[in-house]
Image (cartoon, grey):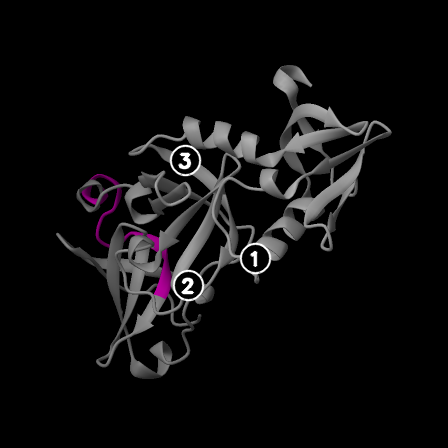
C-alpha cells in the first residue's frame, strides 16, 4: 500500500448498480468506491458509466485509499486517474490498450486514463469503420495531442503520429522487398488502399478477381513495386491470399 495506492484484484469487487458504486473486500476488510470517486473523466450515466465501471470491476483496478467511513475503507479511482492524467504529457508517445471501438473513434487506456483517437488520427490511409481493423484488447501506441481540463479531462491522441514519419520509409524499405500491409478500402479502379504502417499509406495493384477476395482489415503479404513521397505501390507477393 505504498503511497496509499492499492490494486483491487478481479473478483474482489462488484458493481452495485442500485447505489452506483463499487463494493468489495480488501484483505478481509469492506471497502467501497463512492459515485463521486469512480472516474476522473466525464461519462453519461445512461450507458457509458455502467458499462465502463462494470469493466473496471471485472478486470480489477488501482485506487487511492482515503479516510475510512463508518468503519469501511474508501477507495478513490478518481484520485488514481488524476495521478495518471498529470503524468501524461502533450506531444509524448505512450503504449496503451484499446478498451472500446466504434465506427469513428478508438478509446485507448494509458496509465489508467482514457485517450480518444478519432478515425482521422488512426491512419493516413482511409478507414471507413474502425471496427473492421481494431478489437478490444489490442495494444498500440498513441501520441498525446491535447489535454482539455475545461471539459472534464478529455484527452485526444493520434495513432498515426505515434509511428515513423513517411520520410523515414526510404531508410527501411526498398523496391522488391516483401512486407505485410493492412487492407483499408477497395478503390474503383484495379487497386486497394492499404497501409504499411499508420503513417505509410499505399496502393495495392492486382487483377480484379484477386482484389475482390480481400477483406478490409486483412493483413496481406505484398511486394513493393514503387516508393513515392506520399506512399508506396505494391502487388501481392504470391497469387494466393
x, y percentage for residue 28?
Answer: 87, 29
Discs 1/2, front = 1
Pointer 3: what residue? 94
As drawn, the residue found furthest toward the top would be 2
Q: In the depicted view, which residue is nearer to us: 167 or 42?
A: 42
Position of 217 compared to 177: left or right? right
Asked if residue 87 is positioned above or below residue 235 in the image, the reply reads above
Disc 1 to disc 2, how far (Cα)? 25 Å
Pointer 2: what residue? 130
Q: Secondary structure at mark 3?
A: strand
Discs 1/3, front = 1
Whichever of labels 2 and 3 marks the residue nearer the N terminus, that label is: 3
Whichever of labels 1 and 3 marks the residue nearer the N terminus, that label is: 1
Indicate the quadrant where residue 149 lies: top left
Image marks 1 and 2: residues in contact by CB distance under 8 Å:
no
x, y percentage for residue 16?
Answer: 74, 50
Indicate the quadrant where residue 118 lies: bottom left
Residue 103 visible in this rendered orientation of the protein: yes
Residue 163 visible in this rendered orientation of the protein: no
- Segment tinted magenta in the rendering: 169-183
Sort mark 2 into few (<14), some (14-19) or many (20+) by Cα contacts within 10 Å. many
As drawn, the residue found furthest toward the left would be 229
As drawn, the residue found furthest toward the right would be 28
x, y percentage for residue 152?
Answer: 42, 43
Pointer 1: what residue? 45
Amino acid at each position: 500500500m505504498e503511497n496509499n495506492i492499492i490494486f483491487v484484484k478481479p473478483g474482489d469487487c462488484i458493481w452495485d448498480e442500485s447505489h452506483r458504486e463499487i463494493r468489495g473486500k480488501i484483505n478481509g476488510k469492506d471497502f467501497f468506491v463512492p459515485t463521486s470517486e469512480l472516474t476522473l473523466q466525464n461519462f453519461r450515466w445512461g450507458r457509458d458509466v455502467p458499462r465502463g465501471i462494470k469493466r473496471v470491476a471485472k478486470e480489477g483496478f488501482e485506487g487511492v485509499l482515503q479516510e475510512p467511513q463508518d468503519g469501511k475503507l474508501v477507495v478513490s479511482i478518481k484520485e488514481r486517474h488524476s495521478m495518471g492524467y498529470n503524468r501524461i504529457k502533450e506531444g509524448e508517445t505512450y503504449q496503451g490498450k484499446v478498451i472500446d471501438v466504434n465506427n469513428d473513434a478508438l478509446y485507448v487506456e494509458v496509465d489508467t486514463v482514457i485517450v480518444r483517437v478519432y478515425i482521422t488520427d488512426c491512419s493516413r490511409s482511409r478507414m471507413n469503420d474502425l471496427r473492421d481493423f481494431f478489437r478490444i484488447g489490442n495494444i498500440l501506441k498513441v501520441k498525446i495531442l491535447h489535454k482539455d481540463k475545461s471539459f472534464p479531462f478529455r484527452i485526444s491522441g493520434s495513432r498515426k503520429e505515434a509511428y515513423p514519419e513517411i520520410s523515414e520509409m526510404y531508410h527501411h524499405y526498398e523496391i522488391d522487398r516483401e512486407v505485410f500491409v493492412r487492407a483499408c478500402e477497395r478503390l474503383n479502379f484495379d487497386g486497394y488502399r492499404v497501409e504499411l504502417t499508420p503513417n505509410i499509406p499505399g496502393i495495392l495493384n492486382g487483377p480484379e478477381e484477386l482484389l475482390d477476395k480481400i477483406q478490409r482489415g486483412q493483413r496481406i503479404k505484398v511486394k513493393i513495386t514503387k516508393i513515392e513521397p506520399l506512399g508506396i505501390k505494391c502487388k501481392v507477393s504470391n497469387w494466393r491470399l
